[in-house]
Amino acid sequence: DGENFGAMLKDAMSAVNQAARASDAQAQSVATGKANMVDVVTAVAESEVAVETLVAVRDRVIAAYEEIMRMPI
């Protein structure tokens, strides 16, 4: 269902955005001396994994679209 797929993409984008914000907040906290470096590294790693997953999904969607476009009618 297109509506469910759109909602899934919206949720994925929201999760990536949230991970990036958490990473930024941790980096700012460590700059002011209020956070542990391990927490910052963990937040950055989580953000990186979220972005890599989103890029992989995007690549698969594009590949599927290209495959559909190559199908004979």
Image (tube, helix red, strand yellow):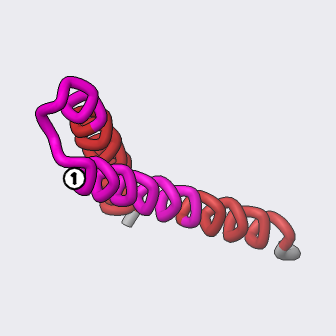
- Is the magenta region chiefly helix, strand or loop? helix
Residue shown at 29% from the left, 45% from the top: 14
For disc 1, the neighbor class at 10 Å (few under 14, some 14 to 19, many from 20) is some
Q: Nearer the viewer, residue 20 or 68?
A: 20
**In which quarter of the view is residue 64 placed?**
bottom right
Q: Nearer the viewer, residue 66 or 48?
A: 48
- Residue 26 position (above or below residue 1): above
Residue shown at 34% from the left, 41% from the top: 20
Residue shown at 17% from the left, 30% from the top: 33
Residue ranking furthest to the front: 33
Residue 7: in sight, yes or no? no
Count all numbered tags in the image, as a single digit: 1
Amino acid bearing label 1: Asp
Magenta stretch in the rendered image: 27-56
Q: Position of residue 15 (x, y in %)?
A: 28, 51
Mark 1, secondary structure of its residue: helix
Q: Position of residue 16 (x, y in %)?
A: 35, 48
Magenta stretch encompasses residue 32: yes
Q: Nearer the viewer, residue 45 or 2?
A: 45
Q: Report the quarter where the C terminus lies.
A: bottom right
Residue shown at 29% from the left, 52% from the top: 43
Q: Report the quarter where the N terminus lies.
A: bottom left
Horizontal side of residue 21 vs 1, given as left or right: left
- Residue 29 position (above or below residue 12): above
- Residue 62 position (above or below residue 29): below
Horizontal side of residue 69 vs 37, given as left or right: right
Residue 37: in sight, yes or no? yes
Q: Nearer the viewer, residue 57 or 18?
A: 18
The residue that mark 1 highlights is 39
Magenta stretch encompasses residue 55: yes
Q: Position of residue 54 (x, y in %)?
A: 49, 57
